Image: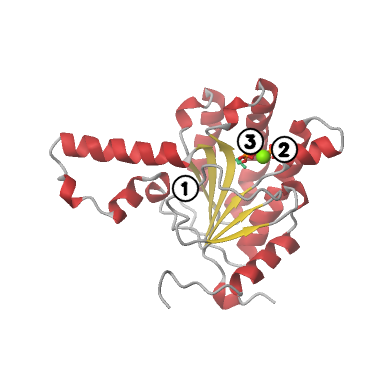
């Protein structure tokens, strides 16, 4: 049973395994991404239903450009399709959408669609759904360092005054007020972070499950919440 008084406020998910799901069925990888999108919709609803405040999903990494054009284009097409089909419902559920990552490499068409989704849900006060797109933790930290460097160069900031909170505030997650995740889940049996939220996950509980992302159901999601609730978070104390 899930303890309603101990719901992780901020959850991050590495949605991995779409390609293998498709390959196992001798289908093109993009079919796996389509199945993954359906899985994502159910998990958004499941998270919202139990009162999660922040759901942050890893949708496309700074390294994922290494994949074929067909796959990359297919993923962004699915994102556009998802916004078209779901933004109204998300907005009615009072969900606020944000994007973390470097949007400069995305096409004008994709960026226009994203702007539409952001504007439409901007004033919403319910769950914040954060999509990591062309996101990489190292890139995010580099960008924060450059911003601080600029502030020092212009005399606005003295280097002695840099502290951890200031660094956090210059990350995408800081800009969009996303608290450090309480829980991070990765599907597909891979046990690594793949450049996801490396600063922010310092004290997060990590749960790795074997299911491929399209097979990850709300029931399995709730099982991970129960597992989280059985963990003893110590933050270095005793
Ligand atoms: C995760 O699934 C989705 C993205 C990286 C866009 P993958 O496409 O990485 O699936 P596998 O790991 O190849 O099975
Ligand atoms: C991480 O998965 C990125 C996303 C889920 C978007 P990858 O499939 O790209 O990670 P690696 O290559 O297995 O580390
Ligand atoms: Mg993968």
What residue does disc 2 label? 33
Question: Could you say where residue 143 lies in the image, as x and y percent from the top left?
Answer: 36, 36
Q: Is residue 123 left or right of residue 90?
A: left
Other-residue count near label 2 (Cα within 10 Å), few / some / many at <14 / 14–19 / ≥20 = many
Q: Nearer the viewer, residue 175 or 231?
A: 231
Q: Position of residue 174 (x, y in %)?
A: 38, 50
In space, the residues marked 1 and 3 are separated at their CA atoms by 18 Å
Q: Which of the two labelled residues, at mark 1 and mark 3, occupies the earlier sequence position?
A: 3
Q: CA distance from mark 1 to mark 2?
A: 27 Å
In percent of width and height, residue 200 lies at 44, 53
The mark that comes first in sequence, 1 or 2, is 2
Residue 109 vs residue 162, the one in the foreground: 162
Q: Residue drawn at (53%, 36%), measured in percent from left and top?
A: 114
Question: Is the distance from the Cβ of mark 2 to the nearest ligand 1 atom less than 8 Å?
Answer: yes
Q: Which residue is mark 1?
A: 122
Q: Which mark is residue 79?
A: 3
Q: Residues within 10 Å of mark 1 (few under 14, many from 20)?
A: some
Can you say whether 227 is above or below 150 in the image?
Answer: below
Task: Please state which of the two labelled residues, at mark 1 or mark 3, is closer to the viewer.
Answer: 3
Whichever of callouts 3 and 2 sits on the residue coming sooner in the sequence is: 2
Image quadrant of ligand 1 equals top right
Label 1 CB-ligand 2 distance < 8 A: no
The yes-or-no answer for disc 3 within 8 Å of ligand 1 is no
Q: Is residue 12 above or below residue 85?
A: below
Looking at the image, is 4 positioned above or below residue 192? below
> Badge 3: few (under 14), some or many (20 or more) residues near its Cα, within 10 Å?
some
Outermost residue on the top side: it is: 69
Foreground: disc 3 or disc 2: 2
> In the rendering, which numbered label is found on residue 40?
none
Give the Cα distance between marks 3 and 2. 10 Å
Q: Label 3 near label 1: C-beta < 8 Å?
A: no
């Amino acid at each position: 049973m899930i303890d309603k008084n101990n719901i992780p406020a901020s959850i991050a998910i590495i949605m991995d395994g779409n390609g293998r799901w498709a390959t196992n069925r001798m289908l093109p990888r993009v079919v796996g991404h389509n199945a993954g999108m359906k899985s994502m919709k159910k998990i958004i609803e499941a998270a919202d239903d139990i009162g999660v405040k922040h759901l942050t999903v890893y949708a496309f990494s700074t390294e994922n450009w290494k994949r074929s054009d067909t796959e990359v284009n297919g993923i962004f097409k699915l994102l556009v399709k998802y916004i078209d089909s779901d933004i109204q419902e998300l907005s009615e559920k009072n969900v606020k959408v944000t994007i973390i990552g470097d949007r400069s490499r995305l096409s004008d068409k994709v960026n226009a669609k994203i702007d539409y989704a952001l504007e439409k849900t901007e004033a919403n006060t319910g769950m914040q759904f954060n999509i990591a797109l062309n996101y990489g933790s190292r890139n995010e930290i580099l960008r924060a360092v450059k911003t601080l460097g600029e502030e020092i160069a212009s005399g606005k900031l003295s280097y002695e005054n840099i502290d951890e909170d200031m660094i956090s505030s210059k990350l995408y997650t800081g800009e969009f007020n996303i608290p450090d995740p309480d829980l991070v889940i990765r599907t597909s049996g891979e046990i690594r972070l793949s450049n996801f939220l490396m600063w922010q996950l310092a004290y997060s509980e990590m749960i790795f499950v074997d299911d491929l992302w399209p097979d990850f159901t709300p029931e399995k999601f709730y099982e991970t919440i129960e597992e989280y609730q059985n963990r003893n978070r110590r933050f270095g104390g005793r």
